[in-house]
Amino acid sequence: QVHLVESGGGLVQPGGSLRLSCAASGSIFSINAMGWYRQAPGKKRELVAVISSGGSTNYADSVKGRFTISRDNAKNTVFLQMNSLKPEDTAVYYCNANIGTATISFNTWGQGTLVTVSS
């Protein structure tokens, strides 16, 4: 069994910054891609950023230049540094990881952390 635990959400003013963390634990043989998604009220969940095991990254156009995804493979942790936050960034942010075991690989999700950008 694998668990993803997110932290770092909260309330921030427009223009501010937050750093999200997501740590994976459990029966992990390897972790392939890790990513962050978000879901705003009344909207579908959308990709924010993803990072491969080798460090290649991809971002949604709406966050390019403001958000940075990174990972610490030794600690099975992925981070999302969010700068210049806007009210439209308000959402529940979910961590996702593609986990490899000895026989299969599968995707798993964290419980989500709320980010509210408001004055």
Image (tube, rainbow, N blue to C red):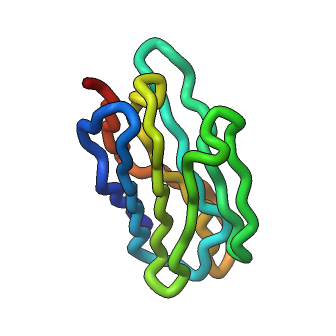
Residue toward you, 66 or 111:
66
The residue sitting at 60% across, 42% down in the picture is 48
Residue 103 sits in quarter:
bottom right
The quadrant in which residue 90 appears is top left
Residue at (44, 37) in percent of width and height = 85
Q: Is residue 29 above or below residue 56?
A: below
Say if 3 sits above or below 74 in the image: above
Q: Residue at (39%, 73%) from the top-left corner? A: 25
- Can I make out residue 1 in this image? no
Residue lying farthest to the bottom in this orientation: 74
Q: Is residue 112 left or right of residue 72?
A: left
Residue 111's spot in the image, x, y percent? 35, 46
Q: x, y (%) of residue 105?
A: 67, 65
Residue 33 visible in the picture: yes
Q: Nearer the viewer, residue 4 or 102?
A: 4
Residue located 57% across and 59% down the image: 69
Q: Position of residue 99 (x, y in %)?
A: 59, 67
Side of 24 relative to 73 (left or right): left
